[in-house]
Image: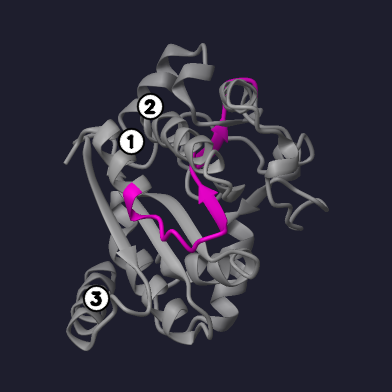
Amino acid sequence: MNDWSEIKNKILKSINPKSQNILVQAGHFSILFNKNGDLVPAIANEINDNELIDFIESSNYMSDFPLKTFKTGIEIASDLRETSKKIKFTFIVNDWQWLNKGLYNFKTNRLQFYKKNKLPVLYSKQFQKHKFSIADIIKVNNYINNSIYFSEQKLRKKGKKTVRDCSPESCAIEYIPFLNESMSDFDTLLSFIPMSCKTPVLYSSVKFIKDCNRAIDLIHVFYDPLKKNIEISILNQHLINLDFEKEINLNFQRMELMSK
């Protein structure tokens, strides 16, 4: 499946009619250094450096993933709000993977990025277009108080202390803390994830749902921006059976072995 309008319609039909509080995680982006040494979102449409644009567009973690998923996510959120659903947004920043592997390398100071506490320009325009605001973003504390961003680096530090069954490089080590910290006030999560993180994210999601003592729906949209492949996963207590859990665990174990 690679049609975003079809994805949007399928998600809207998949939302539980009883759902009241929905969290949307869309527009996930990395940060990296530009040639001036500033940490900037890896969103090609907001960068003037052609070499840096080429670097971003060649990555299966970046490319058009941020803007494509954010536009889809906010359109879905806007439609859901019309049905009296309460909608909030959250943003996860990949602030560890490309800081020392990007096109330009400088001394790392993540606070330089986080203290701005602003959305990318194109995200702000979409928020205005659909009549959302900063108040619709859940706030977290990482490098600053009331940050509009989750830091992957901070989530990974927490995960390394509590998640014992996966390697330090796995997405699972950050996604379990993310779910634990973000979902206490919500019954549904719509989360756009790079396809390369599919297995550890599903593994994390199954663990989270099994440990959760209330009804919750996790809807994931996995996207590979280079191959343009899109997949949807819907998980809740009723959809997780023993065979499914075994398959997810086996796939995760295989991935862990390959990473060693």
> Could you tell whether 102 is left or right of 108 in the image?
left
Instruction: Categorize mark 2 by other alpha carbons within 10 Å: few (<14), some (14-19), many (20+).
Output: some
Tell me the residue that label 3 is attached to: 248
Q: Is 77 situated above or below 171?
A: above
Please name the amino acid that badge 3 sits on. Answer: Ile
Judge whether residue 33 is colored magenta.
Answer: yes
Q: Is 147 situated above or below 27?
A: below
> In the image, residue 2 lies at what x, y percent?
19, 36
Q: Is 16 situated above or below 113?
A: below
The residue nearer to you, when weighing 57 against 18, is: 18
Tell me the residue that label 1 is attached to: 59
Q: Are marks 3 and 1 in contact (CB under 8 Å)?
A: no
Placement of the N terminus among the 4 image quadrants: top left
Tell me the residue that label 2 is attached to: 55
> In the image, residue 18 lies at what x, y percent?
48, 63
Residue drawn at 83 percent across, 53 percent down: 145
Q: Are marks 1 and 2 in contact (CB under 8 Å)?
A: yes
The residue nearer to you, when weighing 200 against 99, is: 200
Give the SS element for disc 3: helix
Residue drawn at 62 percent across, 53 percent down: 151
**Earlier sequence position, callout 3 versus callout 2:** 2
Report the disc number at residue 33.
none
Give the SS element for disc 1: loop
**Earlier sequence position, callout 3 versus callout 1:** 1
Give the SS element for disc 2: helix
The span picked out in magenta is 13-36
> In the image, residue 29 lies at what x, y percent?
50, 39
